């Protein structure tokens, strides 16, 4: 189809420019420059290329749009307004105001048509890689044999990113993996405007981006609206042709470097850092309006003919795309009833009947590292939960994240002796890219049909904290498998021994930190995580732990804290802990009871789940009348202070770790049964006094 641009389209683009400037002026703050100069590109994508239905933003057949440069949120809001996707002019007038549908950065589940929360630069692009990967996995589940471009499960992912996004390391990590994976459904339009907050990027960013992306294995194109002569012409036809070429490329992800002048055509402000993140001011605002032929004194001036045209076009395109897709989808469904049933189940976010029967159980009295128990659980669940998939940041053998016998997610020609697979496999290899892994997992979850997980050592969670925070902010069903959870790592020393990490990650709102005490509590934890579909960090031991004798069930574990071992009558002291230290609490209780001291042992695998319970249940576990309390955990004691109270004692780490064998380190740092016994006696004495 040849490109055509009518006068009404030009007016719509200029309307988008002026609305961006007016919204920021009205709010008193914001980022108008990119939204002004990228208006033609955004309009082209939304009104010509993006497959979406304005009537149904959750339509399964839609393409995805990711605004990685989330500070330019008006770029997306205005196109949603023009297309009639839930926003009206009053919403643009309320830009950046409390409670509005148009916050300063796009927020998932807050604004219709926004697929992802963006703002931290580069994170959106990295998550778009995850969306593209998820769509390939889903195609493999539902329609693996259809020729490329013919399946109802073929979608494109469009991304807008700027210089800032491409400077952030997370985008380099993710785009390198995207090239390795040959994600032909990923199309990146890079706003190459050479301006950031500190003005001209030549002070910090002079690389040849397209050569870098070519080295990653991407399909690269350049569209120069700014000519070497200095002339500036928005050649939208050239951009349209580049997008068509990117869509035709099925074996590689595509990047189009679009050379723009930020804020064009705003006199006095275009091509400066000043227009990046501040309102234009009266003079420049009027200058922009004059340049595009708008009333210089009017605010939020929208011609009714523009809205009629853009919404009619979006609706017509959406209906045509939906009708064509429905026809293909119905033919597929008729020919694939079992796969259709699977799709219906995954879309409904339901687990299959009887799936828990596949969970392994572990014999009390034996011993096993919880990382190994987790690996056994994943392998056992593989046949019954095809939606569950994941891998590791190059630590699969240590994290135990590989489901036995399952193929790797690999493009053709990337098999190795250790890992064989296919483009639709389920074992993921993120490489040594923790931050990208977190963001990619977010993208997988955002696509809506699968349940992803990813593993690394807990100490390296620091590298991915920004992505994990966004997981929690978006409330996504991502499971982070963080192993080697304490000084029990041993000989690798303090660089590899997480000490402050339990406290730090428990501080993220909406993120559940689950640290199971043994193999059976690990199996319980996985079952609960999969049913809850919430952001979760699963914290697992390197070293073997005894499988405890217990009467508890998954229902007890689901409450986050429960009585693992009790005494007759009212206890003299309550000893509580998580993970590998619960065994110390149990041992201490048995020793103290031989001295006539009554002890209740509480396993606390997840404080966040415990806090979800009503006060009556929490009081039944942590009896308010018992002031003598002890916590034991090989991390900082900060999270436990609310539970142990003024008379409580904490057996905890107060410094970084050290190199040495795990047993030696636990003894050296006083994380021992003897220390728990002493703390219990000290707490009893404090409570009495």
Image (cartoon, grey):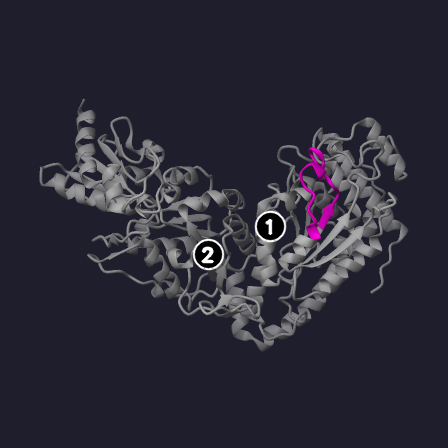
Q: Give SS at disc 2.
A: loop
**Mark 2 — residue?**
394
- Asked whether disc 2 touches disc 1, contact meaning CB atoms under 8 Å apart, the reply is no
Judge from the rendering whether residue 151 lies leftward or rightward of residue 288; answer left or right: left
- The disc label shown at residue 436, or none: none
Residue at horizontal 30%, vertical 53%? 521
Other-residue count near label 2 (Cα within 10 Å), few / some / many at <14 / 14–19 / ≥20: some
Residue at horizontal 89%, vertical 37%? 291
Dividing the picture into quadrants, the one containing residue 315 is bottom right
> Which residue lies most toward the left here?
595
Residue 77: where, in percent of width, then height?
71, 44
From which residue to which does the magenta span run? 190-210
Would you say residue 1 is visible in this rendering?
yes
Q: Give SS at disc 1.
A: helix
Residue 115: where, in percent of width, then height?
62, 50
Other-residue count near label 1 (Cα within 10 Å), few / some / many at <14 / 14–19 / ≥20: many
Residue 127: where, in percent of width, then height?
58, 51
Would you say residue 305 is visible in this rendering?
no
**Mark 1 — residue?**
172
Cα separation between marks 2 and 1: 17 Å
Residue at horizontal 80%, vertical 36%? 270
Q: Reply above or below: 290 against 485.
A: above
Residue 144: where, in percent of width, then height?
58, 72
Q: How many marks?
A: 2
> Which residue lies most toward the top here?
689
Dividing the picture into quadrants, the one containing residue 617 is top left
Judge from the rendering whether residue 538 lies leftward or rightward of residue 32; answer left or right: left
Quarter of the picture holding the C terminus: top left
- Mark earlier in primary sequence (2, 1): 1
Which residue is nearer to you in this view: 96 or 660? 660
Residue 193 drawn in magenta: yes
Quarter of the picture holding the N terminus: bottom right
């Amino acid at each position: 189809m040849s490109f055509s641009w009518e006068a009404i389209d030009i007016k719509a683009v200029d309307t988008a420019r002026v609305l961006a400037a007016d919204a920021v002026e009205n709010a008193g703050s914001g980022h108008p420059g990119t939204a002004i100069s990228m208006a033609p590109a955004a309009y082209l994508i939304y009104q010509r290329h993006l497959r979406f239905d304005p009537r149904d933003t959750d339509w399964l057949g839609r393409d995805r749009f990711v605004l990685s440069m989330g500070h330019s949120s008006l770029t997306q809001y205005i196109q949603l307004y023009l297309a009639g996707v839930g926003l009206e002019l009053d919403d643009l007038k309320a830009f950046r105001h409390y409670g509005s549908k148009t916050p300063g950065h796009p927020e998932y589940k807050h604004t219709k048509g926004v697929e992802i929360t963006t703002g931290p630069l580069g994170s959106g692009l990295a998550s778009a890689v995850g969306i593209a990967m998820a769509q390939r996995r889903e195609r493999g589940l539902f329609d693996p044999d259809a020729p490329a471009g013919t399946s109802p499960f073929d979608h494109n992912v469009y991304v807008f990113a700027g210089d800032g996004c491409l400077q952030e390391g997370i985008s380099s990590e993710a785009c390198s993996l995207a090239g390795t994976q040959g994600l032909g459904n990923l199309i990146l339009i890079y706003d190459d405007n050479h301006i950031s907050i500190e003005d001209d990027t030549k002070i910090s960013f002079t690389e040849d981006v397209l050569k870098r992306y070519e080295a990653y294995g991407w399909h690269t194109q350049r569209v120069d609206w700014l000519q070497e002569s200095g002339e500036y012409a928005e050649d939208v036809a050239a951009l349209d042709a580049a997008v068509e070429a990117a869509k035709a490329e099925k074996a590689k992800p595509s990047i189009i470097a679009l050379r723009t002048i930020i804020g064009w055509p705003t006199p006095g402000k275009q091509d400066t850092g000043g227009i990046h993140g501040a309102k234009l001011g009266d003079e420049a605002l009027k200058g922009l309006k004059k340049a595009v032929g708008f009333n210089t004194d009017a605010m939020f001036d929208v011609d009714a003919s523009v809205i009629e045209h853009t919404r009619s076009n979006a609706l017509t395109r959406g209906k045509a795309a939906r009708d064509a897709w429905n026809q293909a989808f119905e033919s597929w469904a008729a020919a694939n009833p079992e796969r259709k049933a699977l799709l219906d189940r995954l879309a409904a976010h339901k687990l299959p009947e009887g799936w828990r029967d596949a969970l392994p159980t572990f014999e009390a009295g034996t011993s096993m590292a919880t990382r190994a128990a987790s690996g056994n659980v994943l392998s056992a669940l593989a046949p019954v939960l095809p939606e569950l998939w994941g891998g590791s940041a190059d630590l699969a053998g240590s994290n135990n994240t590989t489901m036995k016998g399952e193929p790797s997610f690999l493009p053709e020609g990337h098999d190795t002796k250790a890992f064989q697979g296919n483009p639709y496999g389920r074992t993921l290899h993120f490489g040594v890219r923790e931050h990208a892994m977190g963001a990619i997992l977010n993208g997988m979850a955002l696509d809506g049909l699968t349940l992803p997980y990813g593993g690394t050592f807990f100490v390296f969670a620091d590298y991915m904290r920004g992505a994990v925070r966004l997981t929690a902010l978006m409330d996504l069903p991502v499971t982070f498998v963080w192993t080697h959870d304490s000084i029990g790592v041993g000989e690798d020393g303090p660089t590899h021994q997480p000490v402050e990490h339990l406290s730090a990650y428990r501080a993220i709102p909406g993120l559940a930190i689950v640290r199971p005490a043994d193999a059976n509590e690990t199996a319980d934890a996985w079952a609960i995580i999969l049913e809850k579909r919430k952001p979760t960090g699963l914290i697992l031991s390197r070293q073997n732990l005894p499988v405890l004798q217990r009467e508890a069930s998954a229902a007890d574990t689901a409450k986050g804290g429960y009585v693992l071992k009790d005494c007759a009558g009212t206890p003299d002291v309550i000893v509580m802990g998580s993970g590998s230290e619960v065994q110390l609490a149990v041992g201490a209780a048995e020793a103290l009871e031989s001295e006539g001291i009554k002890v209740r042992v509480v396993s606390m695998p997840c404080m966040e789940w415990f806090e979800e319970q009503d006060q009556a249940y929490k009081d039944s576990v942590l009896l308010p009348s018992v002031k003598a309390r002890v916590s034991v955990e090989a991390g900082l004691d900060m999270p436990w202070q609310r539970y142990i109270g003024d008379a409580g004692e904490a057996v905890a780490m107060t410094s970084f770790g050290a190199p040495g064998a795990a047993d030696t380190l636990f003894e050296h740092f006083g994380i021992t049964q003897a220390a728990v016994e002493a703390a219990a006696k000290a707490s009893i004495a404090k409570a009495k006094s």
